[in-house]
Image (cartoon, rainbow, N blue to C red):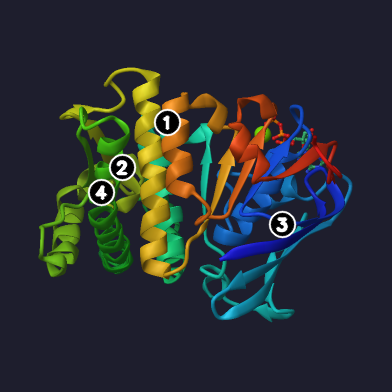
Amino acid sequence: MYLKTIHLRQFRNYQDQKVEFSAAKTILVGNNAQGKSNLLEAVELLATLRSHRMARDRDLVQEGEDIATINATLERQIGEIDLTLTLRRNARRSVALNGESVRRQMDFLGVLNAVQFSSLDLDLVRGGPEGRRNWLDTLLIQLEPVYAHILQQYHQVLRQRNAFLKKSQDSPPTNQHTEQLAIWDAQLATTGTRVIRRRDRAIQRLAPIAAAWHSSISGSTENLQIQYAPNVPVVPDHPEAVQPAFLAKIQQRALAELYRGTTLVGPHRDEIELSINQTPARQYGSQGQQRTLVLALKLAELQLIEEVVKEPPLLLLDDVLAELDPSRQNQLLDAIQDRFQTLITTTHLSSFDSQWLKSSQILFVKSGEISFPASLY
Ligand SMILES: Nc1ncnc2c1ncn2[C@@H]1O[C@H](COP(=O)(O)OP(=O)(O)OP(=O)(O)O)[C@@H](O)[C@H]1O
Ligand SMILES: [Mg+2]
């Protein structure tokens, strides 16, 4: 797939900016705080309807305005598609395809696919489990857009069940309480099981691809293992066993849940374990090695999305290229070649290989405006 144009209106620090992408690689260069990451964030929003910066819609809309729009034309094998996301300061966002409004988010997701790689991704190794769950969920949304709906249903049940448990803390359990809780338990297990099974499947497919990349980048000296560690145990090859296990664990933890007034069982407490040579990657080795791991994860995401979607996704590299040493830079560039359309942000062009610069489109970003240099040389 190829992103031909993007048009930002009142989005972050962009007032009204149209960009035409004219090469497989685009380098956005500019000083700090000019709008480079904002542009990548706009593409990410079209792909996932999420921002890895966890921004709220009112942060995305330009200060002093009520509405922001992101509009793009994308070329896919089936033809050209026009995507529009409208964000509002005080109301719900809406989406449209080819000018027609789309009611269900999942019909919009999966049209544009993109893998985002920024320095924040290093937190995948160093940070807490929530970041890893978010990462996996964002990938799953692109692999199977229906997952966005599944996840939303789970979170809705979880919120309601939590509210119920919290309320019950103040009053002694009655029969009516037990019956009501049993209904929430069943819904939690049903919706949660769907989340668990999909996460399990995704990790099973991703892990060997990431391990292969990791071994190739590290020169076969390191063995990367990615393991799904669900809060409710999954028995290999027995997906039907998840739901009963879920309900059994809820029973086990019933007293603790009443006491704590919150749901202690379910995929909102899952972990994805990353280890190198049998040691948790967080403890293992240098920042450079952790960077290798994240690079392997990102390359695996690209490859898996391409396998599933049957078209190469976009790659958004936010400030990370300069952080990689020359050999890892080359590994990444070799893997991308011209197959994946890539948008790269940087503060300095000097960190790029000259061959690479020649074949790239270079755009200057300054205070929310993008200029197209007539010639660099
Ligand atoms: N809702 C908004 N309205 C107006 N301006 C905003 C809004 N949100 C962010 N900005 C501005 O956008 C700028 C940051 O843009 P961005 O994060 O894209 O910078 P960058 O070019 O990637 O910089 P760096 O090199 O530091 O990563 C800041 O000046 C910030 O004030
Ligand atoms: Mg930035």
Q: Residue at x 82, y 43 (%)?
A: 13
State the CA–CA distance, disc 1 to disc 2: 11 Å
Residue type at mark 4: give it. Answer: Ala
Q: Secondary structure at mark 1?
A: helix
Of callouts 3 and 1, the N-terminal one: 3
Q: Secondary structure at mark 3?
A: loop
The answer to whether any part of residue 197 appears in the image is yes
The answer to whether any part of residue 164 appears in the image is no
State the CA–CA distance, disc 4 to disc 2: 10 Å
- The N terminus lies in which quarter of the figure? bottom right
Residue at image mark 1:
328
**In the drawing, does residue 319 fall left or right of residue 265?**
right
Residue type at mark 3: give it. Answer: Ser
* Closer to the camera in the image, 279 or 214: 214
Mark 2 residue CB less than 8 A from any atom of ligand 2: no
Contact? badges 4 and 3 (CB < 8 Å): no
Neighbours of disc 3 within 10 Å: few (<14), some (14-19), many (20+) = few
Of callouts 1 and 2, the N-terminal one: 2
Residue type at mark 2: give it. Answer: Trp
Give the quadrant of ligand 2: top right
**Res. 207 mark:** 4
Residue at image mark 2:
213
Contact? badges 4 and 2 (CB < 8 Å): no
Closer to us: mark 4 or mark 1? 1
Residue type at mark 1: give it. Answer: Arg
Q: Secondary structure at mark 2?
A: helix
Residue 242 location (% of width, % of height):
17, 62
State the CA–CA distance, disc 4 to disc 1: 20 Å
**Res. 22 mark:** 3
